[in-house]
Image (spheres, grey):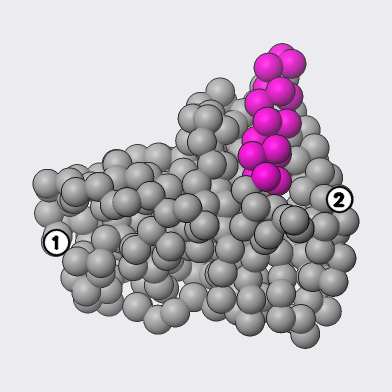
């Protein structure tokens, strides 16, 4: 039987994670490890995707963009190493993203968390755990966004610093946190796979203003992202809109 898109995404995300763990065990660290990891994981992912799905387009953080992809319905969107800093520091909050967007919609996603030994997929969503009380809100461990802090204060959420975008999104999927609001700018590869996995798990996913997220755009920049439990979505969108930057 031919390998499905879901199976392909899960297999490749997991395999890339194994490559990254092997490289880290070999003794490199810091920026040198991050560079080597990005290159090795990207080479494997792009080679395997092109072999398995030669008619599909491909967008990777580590490859030169070919905008001919915009004329195609199916595009694989990958981030070979999300959280390069965390990976180089020996932490566990980094990820590998493999996603398929169809007609601009995040349809298939696999997010490997190699440091934790798991790969979460859109094909096998985890049942949502009970909400945390008070809610927990994920923020950057180095640059917490002022908008996120503002929203957290108004919904009574505790801040939970964490590394990569994929790790933060999967923390909501796994019930460790309840909301991930990012307003500092990302690119399509930063969140396409996490969005597909979060949607499948029954979470709310949108832009910060509540509008849908579209992929395979000519400009791959995405200014903001909201992944949260559905009961928090209305308040998160409302308070994010109220935020006014201070001078």
* Residue for badge 2: 47
Task: Name the spot of residue 175 as percent of width and height, x first.
Answer: 29, 45
Q: Quadrant of residue 145?
A: bottom left
Residue in the image at 56% along x and 69% along y? 107
Quadrant assignment for the N terminus: bottom right
Please, which residue is most extreme toward the front here? Answer: 1
Residue 82 visible? The answer is no
Farthest residue, direction bottom = 71
Judge left or right: residue 134 versus residue 223.
left
Q: Is residue 56 magenta?
A: no
| Coordinates of residue 124 in the picture (x, y in percent) | 47, 53
- The quadrant in which residue 102 appears is bottom right
Image quadrant containing the C terminus: bottom left
Q: Which residues are magenta?
A: 11-27
Query: Gap in Å between the C-alphas at discs 1 and 2?
Result: 47 Å
Q: Are marks 1 and 2 in contact (CB under 8 Å)?
A: no
141 with respect to 60 (left or right): left
Q: Does the magenta segment cover residue 19? A: yes
Q: Nearer the viewer, mark 1 or mark 2?
A: 2
Report x, y in % for residue 149. Answer: 26, 55
Give the structural element (helix, strand or loop) at label 2.
helix
- Image coordinates of residue 74 in percent, x first then y, are 71, 74
Find disc 1 in the rendering and name its residue: 154
Question: What crowding class fits label 1: few (fewer than 14 Cα within 10 Å), some (14-19), or many (20 or more)?
Answer: few
Quadrant position of residue 201? bottom left
What residue do we see at 63% from left, 82% from top?
A: 103
Estimate how packed mark 2 is, as few (under 14), some (14 to 19) or many (20 or more) residues with alpha carbons within 10 Å: few
What residue appears at the point 76 percent right and 81 percent down from the top-left corner?
72
Task: Give whichever of 61, 46 is nearer the camera.
Answer: 46
């Amino acid at each position: 039987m031919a390998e499905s898109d879901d199976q392909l995404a899960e297999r490749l995300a997991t395999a890339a994670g194994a490559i990254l763990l092997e490289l880290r065990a070999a003794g490199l660290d810091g920026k040198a490890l991050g560079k080597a990891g990005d290159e090795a994981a990207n080479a494997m992912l792009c080679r395997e995707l092109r072999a398995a799905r030669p008619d599909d387009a491909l967008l990777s953080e580590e490859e030169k963009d070919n905008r001919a992809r915009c004329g195609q319905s199916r595009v694989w969107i990958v981030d070979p190493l999300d959280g390069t800093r965390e990976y180089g520091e020996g932490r566990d909050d980094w990820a590998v993203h493999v996603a398929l967007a169809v007609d601009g919609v995040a349809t298939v996603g696999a997010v490997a968390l190699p440091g934790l030994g798991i790969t979460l997929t859109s094909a096998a969503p985890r049942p949502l755990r009970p909400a945390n009380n008070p809610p927990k809100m994920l923020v950057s461990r180095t640059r917490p966004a002022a908008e996120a802090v503002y929203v957290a204060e108004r919904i009574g959420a505790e801040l939970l610093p964490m590394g990569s975008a994929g790790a933060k999104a999967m923390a909501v999927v796994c019930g460790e946190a309840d909301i991930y609001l990012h307003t500092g700018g990302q690119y399509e590869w930063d969140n396409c796979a996490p969005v597909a996995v979060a949607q499948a798990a029954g979470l709310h996913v949108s832009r910060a203003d509540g509008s849908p997220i579209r992929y395979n755009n000519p400009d791959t920049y995405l200014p903001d992202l909201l992944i949260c439990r559905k009961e928090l979505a209305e308040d998160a969108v409302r308070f994010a809109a109220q935020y006014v930057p201070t001078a």
